[in-house]
Image (cartoon, rainbow, N blue to C red):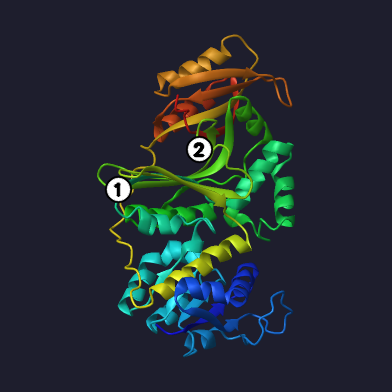
Amino acid sequence: MAATVGIGLLGLGTVGTAVARRLIDEWELLGERAGATPVLRRVAVRDAERPRTVNLKNVPLVSDPTTVVDDPDVRIVIEVIGGREPAATLIEHALAAGKTVVTANKLLAAHQGPELSRLAEQHGAGLWFEATVGAGLPVIALLRGSLGADRISRIDAIINGTTNVILTHMRRDGITLRAALADATERGYAEADPSADLDGWDAAHKLVIMSWLAFGVHVQPESVDRVGIRDIDLADLAYTGQLGYTVKLVAHAHTGDAGAVHLRVRPTAVPADHVLFGVDDSDNAAFISGDLAGEVMLRGLGAGGESTASAVVSDVVEAIRRLDAQPQPPATRPAALLDGEAVEVAQYVRLRVADMPDARQLALQALEDRGVPVVEAIDKPPIDGPDPQLLILTGSAPRAVHDRALETVDSLPFVREIVSTLDRIEPSS
């Protein structure tokens, strides 16, 4: 193996800066671990004249990313510019030239991961994407390698740091989502446009990648059952807390007996005895169930430039070790989706009901009559009006059964409003 391996970097934002700094400042350490020293040869940026917070020394900055990919001294291309284009074209170009690519691009990996992996194989290149899920948490390595002997049946994960920071801040400090978002933005946890986080797209992209590796099924992100956190109410955070739950944006996937899969990202009430209960602030966690290893959990900082850079540079080290034997593409079979309406769920429901005799009992009876078991019902005083609140914890039933039962409840004359519903993980005991 050569004493040095040339590295080209596409993007010098928060992550790219941290990556460049590590490659330049820790070249000796990385060389010892990789078996050859990664040397940063060229960096592509939008504005080459803009001041930078990293000392690139003699590494040239260029505005044309193609020159980085085409540089004969570049063997490994790192892509941290994000988005679909021009990232897809640049990665395809690099792979077609037989160059290994390390990417943090979860959007691209979710949509085109299998296609890019096949392209890499065709040209004797490698595709590494640890940083697409969980930043510095080695989720991809676990699924791609360490659990390679297991049949994985289920994934439950908190994989969006922005929403976790927001929900934690709302619950602890009693502030609105808008105020919590503003604080998260100021602290660098939220993008200028936070839509992908708030609407669950970021978590959905990551779940697609995890499920592809875990189940060998590639699901398009648009097929994920996805609900974001925009409608989360402070009252529900308080009420669920009183009942022993906390609300998290949980990414869930499981496979049925015939190999069909179900993927969903939804705000979920998590009970105190669940491993995800205490995963707060910018921490991420992945809880994976396999038939041999049993239940495995990873937890740690899942957001920020340095944590993501850890995954990127670790991939560079591993890619150098395996320049002559890059990993095979993950197996991919045609996607078969479980009917989301048939998947069983338990729920938390909050109603606003008329202050009249039997209203409570009649609402609960309507749920039971339509196949939704009632585990617990709690009366709460009115909020902003004369009507009492009724909190209901339902047991497991198909989502379609829940939906039809709630439609019936909503039609009852004494039910003023179904204020909110949340999926709920049932306590283990």
The answer to whether mark 1 and mark 2 are in CB contact below 8 A is no
Looking at the rendering, in which quadrant would you find the C terminus? top left
- 59 is higher (above) or lower (below) than 52: below
Q: Can residue 198 be seen in this view?
A: no
Disc 1 element? loop
| Residue type beneath disc 1 | Arg
Q: What element carries label 2?
A: loop
- Looking at the image, residue 294 sits to the left or right of residue 364; the answer is left
Instruction: Please provide percent x and percent y for residue 406.
Output: 49, 28
Residue 257, quarter of the rendered image: top left
Q: Position of residue 223 (x, y in %)?
A: 41, 52
Q: Nearer the viewer, residue 171 or 410?
A: 171
Amino acid type assigned to the residue bearing label 2 in the image: Val
Residue beneath the point at 60% across and 51% down: 161
Nearest to the observer: residue 155 or residue 322: 322
Q: Which mark is residue 275?
A: 2
At horizontal 69% and vertical 40% (from top left) the residue drawn is 170
Specify the farthest residue to the bottom: 72
Seen at 33% across and 67% down, the residue is: 329
Name the residue rendered at 72%, 80% in the picture. 50
Residue pushed farthest left?
258
Q: Where is residue 151 in the image (x, y as percent from the top left)?
A: 30, 48
Could you say which quadrant of the image residue 416 lies in? top right
Query: How many C-alpha atoms fall within 10 Å of the one at disc 2: few (<14), some, or many (≥20)?
Result: some
Q: As rendered, which of 340 and 268 lies closer to the eye?
A: 268
Name the residue beneath numbered marker 1.
151
